[in-house]
Amino acid sequence: MRTLARLSALATLVVALCADPFLVHAQSGANPEGKQSFRKLQSQHNDKRKVHSLVTLGYHYVSRLPLPAAKDSANAIFRFADSVSIHLKYDSGKLESRLGLAQVWIKMAEHDMADDERLPLDLNPLKRMFDGIASLVKTKQNFETTGETYYKLAMLLSRRTYFFDYRIMLFDSAAFFFHQSGNRNRESETWRQSGESCHQQSKLDLAVERYYKSIEVMQGGHRKGLSDPYSLLGNIFLYQGNYKKSLELLLVAYDLAEKENKESESFGWVNLFLGLYYKRVDDLDLALKYYQNALQVFEKLDRTNAEDLIYAVTNACKIIVIKSPSQSIQLMDRIVKEHPMVVGEHMYVIILNERMIAYARMKDYAMAQKYCDQVVKRIKTRDLAASKTLVRDVIDFLVDSRQYVEARKYLALYQPVVRKEKPALRDSYYVMHRIDSAEGKFEAALINFTKFKLLSDSLLGQTKLKEIAELKISYESEKKEQSIALLTKDAQIKDIQLVESRFARNIIIGGALILFCVLILVFTLYRKRKQIGEDLQVQKDEIDKKNLILQRVIGEKEWLVKEVHHRIKNNLHTIVSLLESQSFYIKNREALSAIQDSQSRIHSMSLIHQKLYQSESNSSIAMGPYVIELLDHLKRSLNGPKQIFFEVDVDEISLGIGQSIPIGLMLNEAITNSLKYAFPTPGKDRISVRMKKHENRVRLVIADNGIGLPPNFDRKNKHQGLGLQLIHGLTAEIGGELTLTSEAGLTIDIEFKVNDKLEQIADQYAYDVAPYTAALFDSEMQDGKD
């Protein structure tokens, strides 16, 4: 729950305490004063005080980032501080100056990634800096100091998606060194921080593992702060649909946090998670109570965390908006007015989302749409897994405002993300039912409603409700145990006296009642069993009817898919025939060559659809027969009088259409290129194609022993031939890595990950060959004109 901003501010404050007084004044001054201070420090005698002053001045420029001048100045000052520390053999100075350099890099990276967190980010420069920092303390063989250093490095990184893997690695390293040093408190805290990072990225299995490690380390020892991993575990089990386990853990966390400090951040989070729990089981009054408790705690903290405050107020508004949307808006307005720092927080999008919900409840769809547009704009720059709750609320608004096409689009993105979260998946089926019903698709609506009911019954059946109620009663009973104990003693004494006086009468009455109850029970069981049998028969008939409908629908869809592939194949053959006819009237050799190349490429795609149409499976292609047939076509089309030996070694690999077509096009380009240009003079010419699979990765190698690439060939040139451009583009499309080697011929090495079965099916329906065909034909015709 700590943030990078807190750590940065703390580091700046600590360093400033050791600095020269005139430099503290310079921190708030203009830029020329900073430069003047730097020049003055450069001329001073080298000592530790000078290093601290330089570090303080460096953090002055860090506070001015992302200005380019501030970046250059901060880097220059920290590097100078590092060189002075090296000269003095002052390890603490080297550590502080290199941490400063790392902060400059991180702040600039966050600024560059602000528009879209999903862009690729090269972390190698940062890793080299961090490795250098860690090496300073590793050499001293001090495990606790090394652990603190790794922990500090991890805390420098924000909880953004692009830092996730590296942040986890640093926390795990810190935990290892704390374990070696025997510091159980720091080890437990580190495992919890690591779990929070995994939790935020929806890596729930990793988060659970780390939370349990945090608890295990502290068992039998000092229990301060132990409520946090318990409450976070309870939150995970809640979203996984294990309500009983969730409530058990949250009640343990509540007791621990209450005994420790009822005004702590930890107590606020336990209340927030309990509110989430009771909202999920539809006890809205209790949910609102715990949300309001959390909000009071976070507002009273001396240094309120904006992110915590946003979570508390927005969840409270989710309950308030049901009865009074206007009160929900008033509460958000008050929080923004009294705590303006929430507006600059990256989680402020949640407040915008709640405003959208409130105005939608008030039927003011125009105002709600304005907030919806702002929420969607922010969602597009973030990782979808971290924004799934926002996406769900946007979907609900789009359905309420009858924007069904847009709702379906976001629902298609939402369902794969929540496939392991049963409650969220259940709700998504209900939304699909609403959309289908509104559009008159009643058969699809019935199917989705059935899925919704099945998941609802599995999540919150009568047995689970009973277990939850018993657990709640058990917890409340423990609170009243002492007062009830005294009353129980008096009642026991009176009961003994009554039992002695009425013993004989009770035996007779009891026997008669037991006999009567047995008779009633036997009759009731008979009636109930008969009724159950009739109900089961009715349900069986309904299920059989639905199964027949589903089988018919599936059969029709399979036939349609085969027909689509057949028609695509015929259309592509028609295009090849048209190009063949056109080639008889073209005298320009370059144009003729371009048309022939287009024919080969289209044939490679047509062959894919032919294989799909002829095979029993509509979703994958056996690559062995496909490669052999494609090579046979290219040999007959392009080999001419040359005697070229082909080597083919392909494992039993099946790929979906989304990967098969790019692979076929790349094979076509590479083999065509070798046949045309690799062998200017006859010899022992050879072309080999190897396709090997290891686990879920495939390696495709196409090699010849021809003349290779020209000596002056520039691989980085963006204006390469169309063939290489296509190979580069198609490799990127399938998420692969391309390597070109020109030694004793040309070798094209492509390695990529195989899509799983669900992705293959998605590729089958989503893949559109028309853009490929049009783009290839236009490019080749343009080359011919040139």
Image: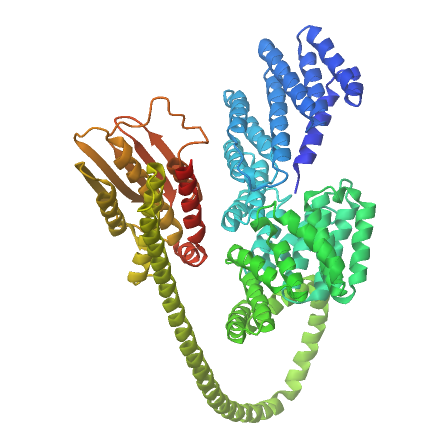
Q: Quadrant of the N terminus?
A: top right
In this rendering, the answer to whether 571 lies above or below 257 is below
* Residue 80: percent from left, percent from top: 63, 14
In this rendering, the answer to whether 39 lies above or below 390 is above
| Relative depth, front residue between 330 and 287 | 330
* Residue 320: percent from left, percent from top: 76, 62
Q: In which quarter of the image is residue 274?
A: bottom right
What residue is drawn where x is 19% and y is 32%?
Answer: 685
Q: Is residue 267 visible?
A: no
| Relative depth, front residue between 244 and 45 | 45
* Residue 594: percent from left, percent from top: 36, 41
- Residue 20 horizontal side relative to residue 616, left or right: right
In this rendering, the answer to whether 280 lies above or below 151 is below
What residue is drawn where x is 73% and y is 41%?
Answer: 344
* Residue 16: percent from left, percent from top: 73, 22
Q: Quadrant of the C terminus?
A: top left
Q: Is residue 641 visible?
A: yes
What residue is drawn where x is 62% and y is 60%?
Answer: 395
- Residue 13 horizontal side relative to residue 630, left or right: right
